[in-house]
Amino acid sequence: MTFGQDMWTWGYKVADHETGHTFGLPDLYAFNGDLDQYVGGWDLMGRISGPAPSYFGWEAWKFGWITDSQVSCLDTANTYATTLTGLEYGGNGHRLAVIRTGATTAYVAESRKVAYNDSNACATGVLIYEVDTSTTTGNGPIQVVTNPNAAAPTGNCTALDMQTWQPGQWFQDDTARIRIHVNASDASTDTVWTYKVVTA
C-alpha cells in the first residue's frame, strides 16, 4: 500500500483511514459536491483532518470494539432510556442507542465529548446520524442529522461540526415514526430516550 503525498498532508491518520477500508469501511466524504456534506469532521472516514476524527460508534461496533451488550437497540414499538458513555472513554457502559427503521436503515445516537482523539471537537453532546448500509461508498452511507438549534460555528469549525443535541432537544422522523430525546448530560455521559411507534 502506498500513500503518495497523502502521508505528507494527513500524517498517521491516512493510515487509520486506509486501514478502515481494509476492514470494510466505506468513504464517508462525498464523491460529488461538497466533500463534507454527509459527516463533516466527525469521522476520519470522512474528513481525515476533522476536529473529531474518532470512528463513529457504528463502525466501532462493526470492529468489535463495542460489544452487543453496549448497544441499546430498539427495533419494535417501545421506549428505552439509555445513558450513553462518551465514545472517547473506556468502560462497560452503553455506547450506542440504535433505532432500526428498515432492512438496511437505522438511526444511531452516541455521546461525543471533547477528549482524547476528539480533543479538538467543535461541539459536545449527543450526535445523531442515519445509517443506510445499501448506500455505496462516497454517496452518504452515514449522514449526520442536523440540529436546527445547534450553535453557530466558530474558528475553523463548519456548520456540520456543530450538530450535537443537548438536554431538552429532540429529533423526530415522522415517516419512520421514531424520536430521540436528550434528557440529561454531564462531563462523561448523555442520557437519551428513544421512541418507536407502531406503524399503522
Image (spheres, grey):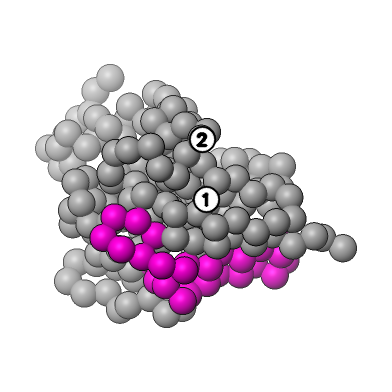
Q: Is residue 68 visible?
A: yes
Q: Quadrant of the C terminus?
A: bottom right
As helix, strand or loop, the secondary structure at mark 2 comes to helix
Q: Earlier in the sequence, mark 1 or mark 2?
A: 2
Q: Nearer the viewer, residue 28 or 54?
A: 54
Please name the residue shown 53% across and 68% down the image. Answer: 181
Please name the residue shown 73% across and 50% down the image. Answer: 76
Q: Is residue 49 visible?
A: no
> In the figure, 92 relative to 34: above or below?
above
Residue 133 is one of the magenta-drawn residues: no
Residues at discs 1 and 2 in contact (Cβ within 8 Å): no
- Report the side of 35 relative to 180 (left or right): left
- Report the side of 176 relative to 199 (left or right): left
Q: Which residues are magenta?
A: 163-190
Please name the residue shown 39% across and 60% down the image. Answer: 190
Foreground mark, 1 or 2, reads 2
User: Which residue lies under the disc numbered 2?
Assistant: 69
* Residue 97 numbered tag: 1
Q: Position of residue 82 (x, y in %)?
A: 50, 54
Q: Nearer the viewer, residue 181 or 176?
A: 181
> In the rendered structure, which amino acid carries the disc numbered 2?
Ser
Residue density around tag 2, few if under 14, some if 14–19, many if 20 or more, within 10 Å: few
Residue 178 is one of the magenta-drawn residues: yes
Extreme right residue here?
200
Extreme left residue here?
8
> In the figure, 92 relative to 76: above or below?
above
